[in-house]
Amino acid sequence: MTTQTKMQQTGIKKKKPAEVEAPLRRFLSDFFESRVAIFGLSIFLTIVFVAIFAPMISPQDPYDLAQLDILDGRLPPGSENTTYGYTYWLGTDDQGRDMLSGIFYGLRTSLTVGAMSALIALIVGGCIGLFAAYFGGRVDTVIMRIVDIQLSFPSILIALVLMAILGQGTDKIILALVAAQWAYYARTIRGTAMIERQKEYIEAAICLAMSHKRIVFRHLLPNCMPPLIVVATVQVAHAIALEATLSFLGIGLPVTQPSLGLLISNGFEYMLSGKFWISFFPGIALLITIVSINLVGDQLRDVLNPRLRR
Amino acid sequence: MTPAAVSSTSSLSTLAVENLRTHFFTKAGVVKAVDDVSFSVGTGEILGLVGESGCGKSITGFSILGLVDPPGKVVDGKILFHGLDLVDLPEEERRRLRGSRIAMIFQDPMMTLNPVLRIDTQMIEAILAHEKIDRALARKRARDALEQVGIASPDERLRAYPHQFSGGMRQRVAIAIAMLNKPDLIIADEPTTALDVTIQAQILFEAQKLCRETGTALIWITHDLTVVAGLADRIAVMYAGRIVEQGQLGDVLDHPLHPYTRGLIGSVPSRNRRGSHLYQIPGMTPALLNLPTGCAFRERCDFADDACLDQPEITEPVPGRPVRCFHHFAGEKA
Amino acid sequence: MIVFLIRRTFQSVVVLLIMSLLVFVGVYTIGNPVDILISPEATQQEHEAAVKALGLDRPMWEQYRVFLTNALHGNLGDSFVFNEPALKLILQRMPATLELAFGAMFIAVIFGIPLGMVAGIKHHSWIGRAIMSGSILGFSLPTFWVGLMLIMLFAVIFGWLPASGRGETVLLFGIPVSFLTVDGLSHLILPAINLGLFKLSLTIRLTRAGTQENMQLDYVKFARAKGLSNTRVIGVHVLKNILIPVVTVLGLELGNVIAFAVVTETVFAWPGMGKLIIDSIDVLDRPVIVAYLLITVTMFIIINFTVDVLYSILDPRVRLGDVKS
């Protein structure tokens, strides 16, 4: 270690006792320190807003065939709707569907699938990881072996196999995503819980003869949350990308379910004739969603990581 | 070397540091790691630079080599090497001096050698960086250098990786690397701190012998007064970025002029005073970021009074004994 | 070393067995391939004959036993669609996928390591930040969409490079490869960039982190104190140290690249295993699906094993046996 870093450390020690803030407030003020993170978060919240209120703000219902006019098919961005007179700002696809509306609805589906699968995977993986860490020994060895083996296979392969077995559908894709991702959560929480378990407050709880359930969920779990939250953010972005990929490959969501991956896939064949907008704009929407989540995730990691805390 | 750059006052010294200031511009503020430091070393002389960790002694060494990393910067002062001021020298010329005329040995031998390169690679490159000679010749010189620092079967050891050596052996290799180009000055930054006491003694002995034989000047940086006591000709005591006292080894140890030096000497366990309490300097080393105003030592000093609220300047109450204190013990008989 | 080899081989066999069981049961419990394979107008007798011919009337454990016995003889069953051995079908397409995967890795390493080192050394300057922002983008871009955009830009708008297929191939040691012909190489560039982009971002991040960490270590300062030029300190001392973790991670990622080739192959109509598996999933060609999965799993096991051995060669401090034993 150089003298420089030593000096910086002594600097930290000096500062700490002065600022005793509420943890949440401190977390928030740390989080909003980065302008990039604020930018990411506001974009993400806008996307969530659009997804929730898609039926209200979309010019048309892109999946109501009665509203679609096949004669309006493959119109470039900025064209006029022939019957109702509104503008297709982002053009239309082969069935005369307004791309903007399609994207709004697609975001809805993509976010739902991403959030649901991340949440379920978090609960499943979290419980398994906690279980392994708390009981340790053979249970831990066996569980972690399974986790290691699963993690050595790419998530897309696992999802691919499951979708091949299960067939298409929203519930099925969520199941496949959960199966592909639970192991990340399990490993993360197990790592933290193993460290927390050594600490005195858990020992104290055991000495007080509290029930396993109470110790695990009331004492251990809250202290393991920070890294889990970071992993969850990144995994939501992964889940969304993975769902889009599977849908693009034609083994994800059925055609009746609007999803960004499906919209992009629809535009694939028109790409070569230069009608780029059918694939281009849903891809941009997907990209912005994933980038905004990743930006938030990056900052969360910096803020919640005690090693990097300044 | 241009004659114009030669300073008349220090032409006899191998190295003369004058009013050196190295500051670190961190987010939290300016850290004055080295603040108005002056000293010199002559040919074949060993200077012990003593101080607690974090007092700026390593940064002094890095400043001389020109290896202070941002946000650190030498902001003022002169570093005269054979009369040539290094501070304004272009980077390429400083590089040519590093390792050939001025060499450095680091604290932790486990960390200084590159773990994935063989010893011969690391030794030969140090020669070839400064001289365009045949590889085989460089190899032979590397081998001889290993032999010189007392490494058995040097030919075999050349082909080994650092992890195959013990800590003491690695430090010998580091010393051999420092000696490779027969430098005029070696800066040794606590090179024995990480080693066992017996190995420590061996290394100290080797270092002293090599300096005497080759006439290399040596700056030995340490926090351990006992190490310098058996090694140095002169010592300089550093506290919070400043040199508070310097002089010939025996003079300083027998008649310390600064309260801090006296405290340091008092806190060394000694055979003469078995059974009596060891002296403890009260308080903690201050963080360099928020030093007290005036004398940095005043909050821990038994003799401090209102005068110490001002920064004491260097005085020379006894010839050859610069000291930075209002209450120095020059009048007392210690 | 020998103990290590034996232990790893044994572990691998167990993993393979478990995987084969899981995959077999999974794939064979769902859907009925007969419905897809024979025409709806077929008579009851024709239907039953088809079921019998495919061995679908026997109990599952019996089917698995037959499958396992055959598998040990190198027979993973015949494709329902092509009427050819599934193993042969996959092995035929494997070189194309491997070529694509190695091409992607090549791009990731050739560009990723220098960019990552620059980003690590100049992490406060605009160039460092620009490289890092680029790598965040590379992480966030969905592979299949980037593929489409590459086609649009370079094939449709500029017309510089072909959009699909493998182009002209030549035999190298009896294996058809594209990269040795001009036409084949032009077909390979876009898919390889597409597949390599994600790994490029990963390489940049790993290299940057490694560079930053290593630059602060004492050995760098000592090397500089020896008077070495910056080029040598960074290009030899630092590079050799960061290469070890980067190569290890990238080696393990090779399996990932092969799996993700599914996406790129679909976009660029690259005739590899990935394209085959997607087509087979569509028509429920069970033997091909099972064979693909088993071969991929085997490849993963071999890759992980090779990486461990390579790691011990690269890093003089590691001796096999201490590795995860």
Image: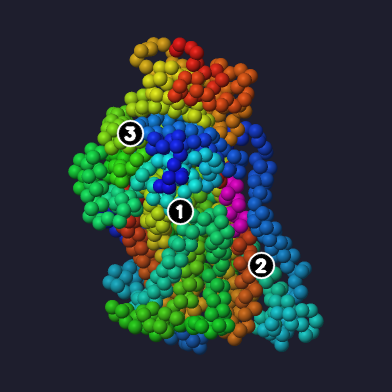
For the residues bearing labels 2 and 1, Cβ distance under 8 angstroms: no
- Disc 2 marks which residue? A107
* Residue kind at label 3, given as amino acid type: Gly
Q: Residue A159 in the image: state x and y as whole percent.
A: 50, 65
How far apart are the two marked residues, 2 and 3, measured between alpha carbons? Answer: 77 Å
Whether pointer 2 and pointer 3 mark residues with C-beta atoms closer than 8 Å, the reply is: no
Q: Residue at x 33, y 68 (%)?
A: C68
* Foreground pick, C74 / A51: A51
Horizontally, residue B97 falls left or right of residue A119, namely left
User: In the rendered image, which quarter contains the C terminus of chain B?
Assistant: top left
Residue A165 included in the magenta stretch of the image:
no
- The vertical placement of C300 against B249, above or below, is below
Distance between mark 2 and mark 1 Cα atoms: 39 Å
Tell me the subunit letter for badge 2: A
C3 and C52: which is toward the camera: C3
User: Disc 1 versus disc 3: distance between alpha carbons?
Assistant: 39 Å
Q: x and y percent of residue A273 in the render? A: 59, 86
Disc 3 crowd rating (10 Å Cα; few below 14, some 14-19, many 20+) is: many
- Residue for badge 3: B44
SS for dot 2: helix
Helix, strand or loop status at disc 1? helix
In the picture of the structure, the residue carrying the numbered disc 1 is C211
Residue drawn 60% across the image and 51% down it: A300
Whether residue C252 sits left or right of residue A186 in the image: it is left
